[in-house]
Amino acid sequence: MMATSGYPDTYYAATAQKTPARPPVSGDVSVDICVLGGGYSGLSAALELAQAGYQVILLEAQRIGWGASGRNGGQIVNGLNASLEKIGAEYGARAQAFVGALVQEGGRIIRDRVARFNIECDLKDGNLFAAYTDKHMRELEAKRLLWKRFGMDEHEMIPASGMRDHVGSDVYAGGMIDHSGGHLHPLNLALGEAAAFETLGGVIHEASPVLTVDWERAAPIVRTAKATVTCKTLIVCGNAYLGDALPELSRRVLPCSTQIMATEPLGDRADTLLPSDICLEDTRYILDYYRLSADKRLLFGGGTVYGGRDPADIRAKLKRNMDKVFPQLGEVALDYAWSGTFAISFTRVPQMGRLGKGTYFAHGYSGHGVTGSHLFGKILADAIRGDLERFDTFASMKWKAFPGGDALRVPYSVLGSWWYGLRDRLGM
């Protein structure tokens, strides 16, 4: 199967809903709101604002969902990368309570839009956190109790003896199910949201990479190779793909890549790997994550490459890990393997804020972008509509630069990754 035109050669592109290419923006354009980025954050904000009656155009450098939003693991994982415990220690009890009250909202937004706009994206329920050690199990139990304090009571501890009901592997010491989690076809979700936005009067321009952004003006100006767009309000959702257009934002986050591969269709064998058709991620710092596709392939992902580079051989890298979890698969055919880039913040807390008076941004979901981006897109839209409470709270959470500046932040992050990976291997 060939990838959908204009997309990387991934399983998602090969099985995506057919969608027309939108023309590049051209000429002099004046609009109420301009959104930069056709991933989940930009689509979420644009869709909310279009529903409220605003005139909105969205500019995407490639195709809708071309970046992380169309290449990720497809898992609805509630929470931020930074734990509620860490947020409490870093920002205080009020920030912890604030985040604890909204970390499941992103998943609810997704389910609401899938139902409201009839988006076909293979949505299924359930997310399993798998523990390798008794220490991991204690950490999961502490997480369950902490989340319960903030009204989240959808978690179920699974002993080692019960893991076989969910995963055909004996490598785990137990786990915890989040029944409010889930999984889906991520590119089809993005394409469905884009189509919904257009039915509400929104305009999308693909193949429109931004060259410069003049955000210091009262009315921000965005320039591409073929157009000048003047808007009352600008929303920047480029995340790891900002490039040089907005160095004020791109230096705040670090691009990272993760890899995924898709096996051949497994038929009835698939049900022996994941009997409850749940998605799974383990609890290590450098984790594995996997699930079944609608056509019974195993989608297996993992690893982090700081700086956003691709490994020389994705299949070889991931198959070693897959064989440890599912040695019974043997030499199964691996039909697709791809890499996707996301952005991490140093604190692992997403960043939200404003440049000048009229330019809003959100980025740095640090590997938890499926739910976080939908939530932050809505918060951005709420702020533009005049409800600034949640926006201001996130904007006040101080961001920290990566140590070492532009030259050394990648080596610093690699060193940290090595250290935490060693702790995982030693069971520390």
Image (cartoon, grey):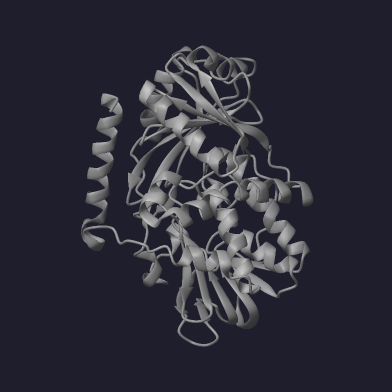
Q: Nearer the viewer, residue 57 or 278?
A: 278
Figure quadrant of residue 383:
bottom right
**Up-down: is 392 above or below 99?**
below
| Residue 77 in view (yes/no) | no
Image location of residue 335, percent across then percent down? 52, 30
Give the number of marks. 0
Q: Nearer the viewer, residue 41 or 285?
A: 285
Left or right of residue 85, residue 112 in this image: right
Q: Nearer the viewer, residue 160 or 18?
A: 160
In percent of the image, x 52 and y 27: which residue is there?
176
Figure quadrant of residue 35:
bottom right
Image location of residue 342, percent across then percent down? 44, 51
| Residue 254 in view (yes/no) | yes
Image location of residue 159, percent across then percent down? 50, 17
In percent of the image, x 39 and y 19: which residue is there?
324
In percent of the image, x 60 and y 44: which residue is there?
186
In percent of the image, x 42 and y 17: which residue is there?
171
